[in-house]
Image (spheres, coloured by chain):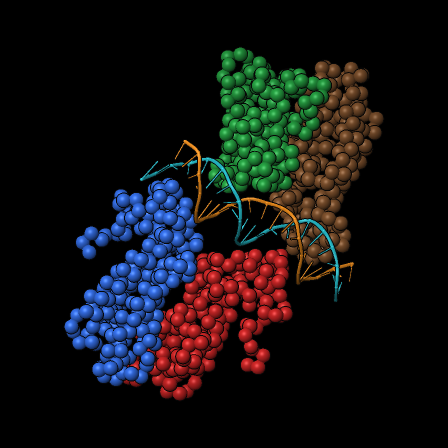
Chain colours: A green, B brown, C red, D blue, E orange, F cyan
Amino acid sequence: MAARTTEPAGTHDAPVPQRLLAVATRLFAERGYDRTSVQEIVEAAGVTKGALYHYFGSKDDLLHEVYARMLRLQQQRLDAVAASDAPVEERLRAAAADVVVTTIENLDDAMIFFRSMHQLSPEKFKQVRAERRRYHERFRALIEEGQRTGVFSTATPADLVVDYHFGSVHHLSTWYRADGPLTPQQVADHLADLLLRALRP
Amino acid sequence: MAARTTEPAGTHDAPVPQRLLAVATRLFAERGYDRTSVQEIVEAAGVTKGALYHYFGSKDDLLHEVYARMLRLQQQRLDAVAASDAPVEERLRAAAADVVVTTIENLDDAMIFFRSMHQLSPEKFKQVRAERRRYHERFRALIEEGQRTGVFSTATPADLVVDYHFGSVHHLSTWYRADGPLTPQQVADHLADLLLRALRP
Amino acid sequence: MAARTTEPAGTHDAPVPQRLLAVATRLFAERGYDRTSVQEIVEAAGVTKGALYHYFGSKDDLLHEVYARMLRLQQQRLDAVAASDAPVEERLRAAAADVVVTTIENLDDAMIFFRSMHQLSPEKFKQVRAERRRYHERFRALIEEGQRTGVFSTATPADLVVDYHFGSVHHLSTWYRADGPLTPQQVADHLADLLLRALRP
Amino acid sequence: MAARTTEPAGTHDAPVPQRLLAVATRLFAERGYDRTSVQEIVEAAGVTKGALYHYFGSKDDLLHEVYARMLRLQQQRLDAVAASDAPVEERLRAAAADVVVTTIENLDDAMIFFRSMHQLSPEKFKQVRAERRRYHERFRALIEEGQRTGVFSTATPADLVVDYHFGSVHHLSTWYRADGPLTPQQVADHLADLLLRALRP
DNA sequence: GATGAATGAGTTTTCATTCAT
DNA sequence: GATGAATGAAAACTCATTCAT
């Protein structure tokens, strides 16, 4: 927490590629991918276009990098939570809350994730979707486990439950404001609670 | 319902403005607003650029029209449902399910709605957001009514519950496929059920 | 002949597409296709880039148009000459001389033809090559006719004779100068004569 | 001849400058000078840009080197042939055939020679043209000698005869295929024969 | 009402070359 | 000898919009 003040890491005098990525993330979140020009990115990062293309093959690569970073982070956190030996409802609650906190803490990435995915090149899009699906499946497995063991209601297909919850995660970037009344953890607890309550038998 | 076969209304030989709007809706949903050129729209509609600019002041106007149509439709349906004198849980269930069905039946509009809102000009954006807020408030009022009368749990702020549910509605355009296993009504029933179950005291 | 002074037709205030084509032809011949920028073309033609792309789909299209014009002209002249009922050696001599005169009279086109063919897009390249082949075959048929009837020597395959002659035509753009000692017709007569002498039995 | 298998000399692990030159020759012939980037050359040669600029002052230098190599080779072969004391028609036949064989054996160089000459810097262009002219003059001297001594017809200026023959040599890179029906020597014999037949008094 | 030629500022990307290490 | 990061100018092409007809 000490070093982190207002600007995202890597904005000041970090190595060029990191600086470019940090700046691009901010701009993509602010104005959208298509409305952010390469020119704006390099100006904000204080380098030339040549430098950008030295490190990234295309504007699309920059976007993909944002996704890769996010996917890596989320998969790794979910794996950690799901592997604990707590009861399944606690594992699900932890996972559901954790993805909310992580999303809020990286709200720029999240906004880009949900809004600009279809602007990736088709092949990169496929790749991201595949990784995303793996993530969803891990999450769904928790719900199915609870349904099998009678802890959760089977009234709703697990698939749909997953989409229900991730819809609300997705939506966070639309309404959550850091200066609002609730801390990330409070929001996370509420949303996880809603999920668990909906699953009561 | 009778007339709806395969093509969206207004594609064939409807009056020019409707035809333009229908074509633009499809293209915006398919490739995104920024990636759809005015040229593509007029070609697909079989008219010239001059004709488009005769009826619409700008490309942005076309997008705004999509929003206006959707907002009008949803507000009107919610008003109808909320005004009934059924018990509050039934009114909420009906409203929650109805917005799902309506969204699925206008999935192109919905996709555009959630994905391209920030591409509206600032003033139109504000206008749309304001109408959207009114809609949410109406919906929230139902939840608050249930909470006041003890029918719904007060564990979660009504605000958050609304966002929870609309997150899942928003998300529909990401995963719902017409050729999937569930009909729009079945999805709607499940999602409304999840909401009501989460609200059980 | 009256109107033709120094500038190629269509340079002054001809319709925009013709003007663009005339200017592009000159520049492509002067500096080569790759070294001629679209910017230079539109500046020389006194229009904007948008106008160019209104009429031509790409820079490549402009190049293709030069080829199409040249191919049309040559094929039509060869057809006329070959269809006469003069003895075969006279028809061959006329064809051989005519292609030289035509080439010299359109030396810019010819230079582009031989130097920039491989810079066409692959599909257009194939198309041009196919038309070119038809032309060569028509020419070869004359030689084969003479060989069959004993007028020409059969020492050399007709194929090779065609390539021999067209090599020299191709080469014209490398060495011929309008201010040199020989008129186009004189050069044509000499080259046709060399061909006919080489074919004496 | 013994060592020549499939790859051009200097491709495998020859010293860096030779490797660069071999790779550049292949790429220039394949895609043309302007369409070959320095990056592609160094990648194909397995070295870095720095290395290239260590040995060659510019991309243009690389092209010039191809020309210098070709010109050295041809001049030296013509000198050898022309210096023999055989009758002039035999010397001319030998020279005419030899340049064909040499060109076919170095078809990449030949293609670059005729197609990319005007892409040299002006000063190098002049230099190459001057050497080329010397070569042509040596060749023309043979024809003039034959004309003076009555062995060759004087119907055509010697100049034009030279251009006629070199046109066909130039043209080889356009049509000759190693897997075609004729060996290089057969092609050479035919073309030399055509030249000699055309020169019969 | 409607056309389509034309604009001009914009887009992403490429590239030969340099230079501190 | 050799590296590879960085430059800066230029490349082809796109696009929403306007306007004389």
Pick whichever, D178 or D84, lies toward us. D84
Does residue A137 show up?
Answer: no
Label count reads 0
Pick whichever, D164 or E21, lies toward us. E21
The C terminus of chain D lies in quadrant = bottom left
Q: Is residue B84 above or below residue C34?
A: above
Image x and y of residue D166, in percent: 32, 70
Residue at left offset 50%, top offset 22%: A76
Does residue B58 show up?
Answer: yes
Residue at left offset 69%, top offset 27%: A175
The part of the image, by quadrant, that contains residue C140 is bottom left
The N terminus of chain D lies in quadrant = bottom left
Residue at left offset 56%, top offset 61%: C41
Pick whichever, A107 or A50, lies toward us. A50
Image x and y of residue B147, in percent: 77, 17
| Left or right of residue C172, residue A122 in this image | right
Image x and y of residue B80, in percent: 81, 33
The part of the image, by quadrant, that contains residue B86 is top right
The part of the image, by quadrant, that contains residue B178 is top right
* Farthest left residue in view: D85
Image x and y of residue C99, in percent: 42, 76
* Farthest bottom residue in view: C86
| Left or right of residue B34, residue D1 in this image | left
Q: Is residue D2 above or below residue C131?
A: above
Residue at left offset 74%, top offset 42%: B64
